[in-house]
Amino acid sequence: MKRLLVLLSISLLIVSCGNKNRGELIGVKQKKWFGEKPYGMQLVEGGSYIMGKSDEDNAQLQNAPARTVTVPSFYIDETEITNSEYRQFVYWVKDSIALAMLARKADELELGEDNKDGIGEFAFQDADTTKLNEFQKYMRANYYDVSEDLFAGRALNWDANLSWNTEDYYDQAYAEVMDSLYLPPEQWYNGEIKLDVSKLVYAYTWFDAEGAAAESKRTRKQFIDRTPFIKKEAVQIYPDTTVWIKDFVYSYNEPMHNDYFSHPAYQDYPVVGVSWGQAVAFCNWRTNFKNGYQREKGKPSVSRFRLPNEAEWEYAARGGIPSGTYPWGSPYLLNDRACFLANFKPLRGDYASDQAVYTVEARSYDPNDYNLYNMAGNVAEWTNSSYDTGAYEYVASLNPNMSFANEFRKVVRGGSWKDVAYFLRVSSRDYEYSDTSRSYIGFRTVQDYLGVQKVKIK
């Protein structure tokens, strides 16, 4: 017994000597977090404000009674998401689909990365199992091969030199795969081979935290099965360019239909023809795209990009001016030089009097005091909030948001190039159905600010 106690004492002494915390509570230290401002975004410091119509409700909608709410700090895009920025998303999806199809074809032909002169260059990165570490071998044996999709989870070779130029096709197998991404010859016109944009589908998963919390509250269990709340989405992400024709009956807008999204002349204009679901998919892609870079550099992940809720949107639109009617503060639509301050439909339908017939570049007119452009006019903007005329009566006063899965009406804010001045007011609310796209609705994204800024003691 004594010998056992002596051995136990020695072992405890060894453990204590080898432990750097000396038995003290020092916490689990992680890498120091230095939050950086995302590219193209502005930090809006949180605070309280009177949300809703503090002035007369001229339209008598009674859907935005004034109330005091508080929102935390967040980053928000300086401009609406542009055609150029959204095309980066489209091109990434297009390339990923092509790489996946080429990798599957190489797998079918039993080609590996050693076949550098042909389609084998695009083989899955785990095609050569001798290069896998033990964890990768375990994942492939236990998860990849039991999925409904035999290729699910396998890494693509993003370093392969993917070419969309027909003169640079590697071999017949490569040509066969790439040809399947285009429309059949009977749908060509003017001698142009057109990409089948219906195949540009972005698939992703997300966790329904609100649904899980409601289930936990209902069952009074802290730990529940997460599986029912992991949602899978597959979204066709190419903008609907036909909105320029569908939105206006007996109106000639074919040039906008043909060129607005694809021509470089419009690359810095806000993207339109994007539904609420497509905007949410873009946010998910932007988050994964950034965090992929963070992982490569060994840095912590950033908070997700998302659509703003309408309380955040209105707070940002006001630009720190509590009682302003418009983002520039004053109740007037003209500056001291008699120039309109936004792109909308003034003077009983004189579209051109504000120097624009349709949309303008996203960085046009003067920004508000948060350095945000076109928070009124140009294009209306999707928010994350569901629309309910009485929502202000029952949502929380702290970071309020009403978002129901079965409510397909989503709040849009800010008014657009085809709207009258009433919809440009920072307090005005409107809605559109989540599966609908319009020639006058775009979006911008926000990102949560992690932590709080250090309090300065005077």
Image: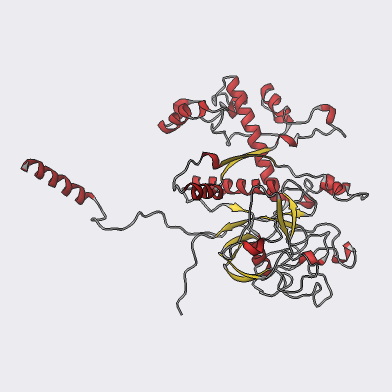
Judged from this view, the residue extending furthest toward the bottom is 458
Residue 134, percent from left and from top? 40, 31
Q: How is the structure coloured here?
A: secondary structure
Residue 43, percent from left and from top? 59, 64
Instruction: Name the image quarter holding residue 412.
Output: bottom right
Residue 17, percent from left and from top? 19, 51
Instruction: Name the image quarter holding residue 99.
Output: top right
Which residue sits at x=84%, y=46%? 257
Which of the two residues, 14 or 307, is positioned nearer the viewer here? 307
Q: Is residue 384 visible?
A: no
How many marks the image carries: the answer is 0
> In this picture, is 329 found above or below 150?
below
Query: Quadrant where the N terminus lies?
Result: top left
Judged from this view, the residue extending furthest toward the top is 109
> In this picture, is 457 found above or below 250?
below
Q: Is residue 203 visible?
A: yes
Instruction: Name the image quarter holding residue 48.
Output: bottom right
Judged from this view, the residue extending furthest toward the left is 2
Residue 346, percent from left and from top? 86, 66
Which residue sits at x=42%, y=32%? 133
Which of the two residues, 51 or 381, is positioned nearer the viewer here? 51
Which of the two residues, 115 or 213, is positioned nearer the viewer here? 213
Which residue sits at x=55%, y=50%? 210
Judged left or right of residue 334, residue 99 is left
